[in-house]
Amino acid sequence: MWDSGTAYREDRPVTGRALAADALAGDPVALRAMSRAGRAIGIAIASATHLCDLDLVTIGGGLSQAGEPLFGPLNEALREHARVEFARRVEVVPAALGQEAGLVGAAALIIEDDSYWSV
C-alpha cells in the first residue's frame, strides 16, 4: 500500500498503472488521487463540450485504462457541470489504443505523410 508520508513506493516505482492498480485494490490514497483526476477531467470535458457540441470524447494515455476509479468521478463531474442538454449526452470512453495511440499516430504521419500534410 501507499506510504502517505512520501511520494514513492518502496517496492516499485510510482506509475499511472500502479496508481490505477492500487485504486482498484481499494487503497484510499490512490482512490482520492484518481477521484481528483477524474473530476478535473470531467469538468474540462464539460467545458469543451459546451464550446464544441461533442458527441464522443476518447481519453488516451497511461490512465485511460484505469476503469471505474477514474471514469466514475469523471462522468459524475461531467454530468454535474454540463449545463446544456447536448453536453449531457456526450460519451467518454478510453482510447482503444491506450498508451499506444500517440505512437500509432506518429507512425501514421510518417507512413502516410501525403495524406496528412497539405501545403
Image (cartoon, helix red, strand yellow):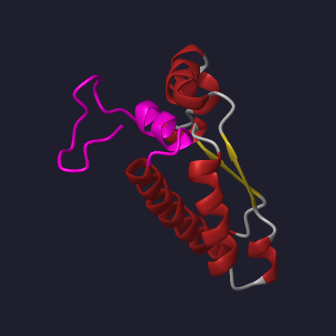
Count of labels in the image: 0
Q: Nearer the viewer, residue 81 or 20?
A: 20
Q: Nearer the viewer, residue 49 or 98?
A: 98
Quadrant of the rendered image containing residue 14:
top left
Which residue, as the protein is rendered here, is positioned at the far top?
111
**113 over 25 or under it: above or below:** above
Q: In the displayed structure, does residue 95 sit left or right of residue 12?
A: right
Which residue, as the protein is rendered here, is positioned at the far left?
6
Q: Residue 78: x percent and y percent? A: 64, 70
Q: Residue 118: x percent and y percent? A: 57, 36
Determine if the magenta segment contains residue 15: yes
At a point 25% along the width and 33% down the height, the residue shown is 9
At a point 80% along the width and 75% down the height, the residue shown is 86
Predominant secondary structure, magenta span: loop
Q: Residue 37: x percent and y percent? A: 46, 57
Quadrant of the rendered image containing residue 100:
top right
Quadrant of the rendered image containing residue 3:
top left
Q: Residue 33: x percent and y percent? A: 41, 54
**43 over 10 or under it: above or below:** below
Q: Nearer the viewer, residue 35 or 25?
A: 25
Determine if the magenta segment contains residue 44: no
Q: In the displayed structure, does residue 73 sit left or right of residue 28?
A: right
Q: Which residues are magenta?
A: 1-27
At a point 53% along the width and 58% down the height, the residue shown is 38
**62 over 5 or under it: above or below:** above
Quadrant into which the N terminus falls:
top left
At a point 81% along the width and 68% down the height, the residue shown is 89
